[in-house]
Image (spheres, coloured by chain):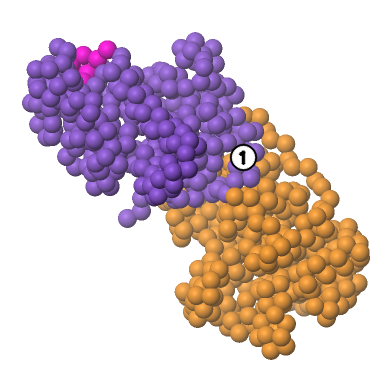
Amino acid sequence: MAIKPVTIAFDVMGSDHGPAEVIRGAAQLSLESPHIHALLVGDRAVIDDVLATTRHSGERISVQHASGFIAMDEKPGEALARKTDASVSVAARLVAEGEADALVSAGNTGACVLACARHFQLLPGVRRAALAAVYPTRMRHGGKEDPFSLILDVGATVEATADDLVTFAVMGAAYARIISRNELPKVALLSNGTESTKGPRHVVEAHAKISGLPGMQFLGNVEGVDIPKGTADVVVTDGFVGNVCLKMLEGVHETVFELAQYAHKESLRWRAGLAMLAGGIQRIKDITDWEQYGGAPVLGFDRIFIKAHGRSHARAIANAGKIAAKAAANELGKSIQQGLAR
Amino acid sequence: MSLPDRIDPRPPRRIYRWDLDKTYLQTEFDSFRDILRTAFQKAHEKQAVPGASALIRELSANGDSRLCIVSGSPRQMRSVLEEKLKLDGVVWDEFVLKDNVGNLMRGRFRALRGQVGYKLPAILESRALAPLEAEEVLFGDDAEADAFIYSLYADMVAGRVDERVLSQILSQAAVYPDEVERVHAAWKKISVADPVRRIFIHLDRLTPPAHFADYGPRVVPIFNYFQAALVLLADGHLTAPQVIKVAVEMVQTAGHNIITLSNSFQDLLRRGLPLQQAAAALVQALEGPNALLQALRPMPDIISAFTKRLAALGTEPAPPPARAVDYLAMLHHALPRTHKARKPPPA
């Protein structure tokens, strides 16, 4: 059976590495996945210049000119109001109008979420959208044996209610089912103890509600230490705590590699030791290589949006496009709605 | 029954020159295994590039053209290749194949891979027999040196290449002395004219289009034959209904759809090809009664897809400027793809 074609809108402007990396990522996608079409939204002249010198399939790429873009350091609300033709806004509108099935952007996160909020609808039963993030873990997850788990929310909803956390659990489980081919993902609430009574009131309340959800493999509460272990496939928390956790995990990762660099410079003996560990270090680097996962979703909207890391290179963008296509082809929105209806 | 008003064939107004492998046929010869498989394939097992046979049929349907095929395939494959062309309903006027066995027997190993010494004299000799006013469109691919050879041929016929440059090219391309002699002999017989209108390069290896920019706007890299048909519509070689027939064959036989076709159309517009009028003609043709297309897809969808891709671009692009081709600077393009001095196209 022929695979249904999927069109992914790429906001090519506003990433840390400039438009070229996003365009190259979409070009790579056009060569690797014949059923995915890329709609590149941004400055047409820039896009054409990069495409002209990059291997791609012209049959699977189209361009929508957008004259403006939101920079990383701009205030999202003000910038979107001022720049009506900003690439992220135009791309979100095209997805809302059905010209594309999903949106991928490596740009300003706030502006992306706000553009989605303006053009997309929240799913029935969802009060607040959640920004998910993938993070490397010791354990593997799902049918694909992904070395990543999902944590949500990491910043879209700073103060979540118990009902919001329940919604996040359902949305995260639906995403893991589709993307990691994990039929029954293990879902957990992040708290300061594993007992059901531990944590602030909204977490305790959410614990009781999620426990009663049919079809959910709920582990109960997990602690911070369980995040890198990968005890749960989906970790649910509010945007404030999630963001702090995520940044701390990134900080630890960077510090470990800085320490290794320091050791490499400091003494010949340590350098020799590191050389012997080179295979293991490379393995850790591979496992924690977020570029292989491409991006993370903003969940709760009726359309799919994958937020790629601002520092994404072409490979990460191509992978984000594949994730977006998979979510669109498997009707992620419908899956979330079914979970919420239970 | 009335007698025809003339008994000799009408002189061709247009000549279409085609390469075969990777231009008309989906041939793999990157490895020894590929070469063996290709050599033993039967006619019905060979696959044409989607839209190629429909395009050739539509071009010859106008009745005033010649189809000249010059292929690097060995002469021993003539019967199977002719059978394949007949299966596809392609009627040719000239069909030249390479004497690889002869080259091998005479120890001319450079000639096995070299294209300049084979194709250039072959098409020059063909041109020497053509009427002065016959214009030409050439079809090649990005696997070997087609863009270089075809452009050089066009500029030689038009008197834009001098003896010194040609000698340097033939020397650098390691062309054998008898082939050099054939090139000069045929060239001398050709009256100066500027007949080559377009050179289409089928991007079989998906070489980035900018790789061919130095050849100027006459060379048009194409991802598929719907793109060639669109340009030929704009150039007056095809009508809009004929272009639609090419598209229909691609949809029916190769899984193309409205997205790939409209993206292909926009790709050409973005590269500065003046297709606005051709697009209007196409939309007009699509609006008329066309049972084949009605069965394929509802008309409004097709028209809307093309219109949207056109509108998405905002201002009309400037066509690429015409330029003189510096063949000496691009001599590495004349070498076989596997030659160590051949620079690879950008990634």
Q: Main secondary structure of the magenta part?
A: helix
Camera-side residue of A28 and A190: A190
Residue A241 quadrant: top left
Camera-side residue of A139 and A170: A139
Camera-side residue of A50 and B264: A50
Q: Position of residue B257 (x, y in %)?
A: 46, 49
* Above/below status of B319 relative to A168: below
Circle 1 SS class: helix
Q: Residues within 10 Å of mark 1 (few under 14, many from 20)?
A: some
In this orientation, does residue A311 appear? yes
Left/right placement of residue B68 relative to residue B76 reads: right
Residue A243 quadrant: top left
Residue found 28% across the figure and 47% down from its top: A144
The question of residue B175 being in magenta is answered with no
Chain given the colour orange: B
Q: Position of residue B315 (x, y in %)?
A: 66, 29
Residue kind at label 1, given as amino acid type: Val
**Residue bounds of the magenta highlight:** A159-167
Q: Quadrant of the N terminus of chain B?
A: bottom right
Residue found 19% across the figure and 25% down from its top: A223
Left/right placement of residue B309 relative to residue B2 reads: left
| Residue topped by disc 1 | A50
Chain given the colour purple: A
In this orientation, does residue A26 appear? no
Left/right placement of residue A9 relative to residue B30 reads: left
Residue found 50% across the figure and 58% down from its top: B249
Residue B277 quadrant: top right
* Above/below status of A81 relative to A181: above
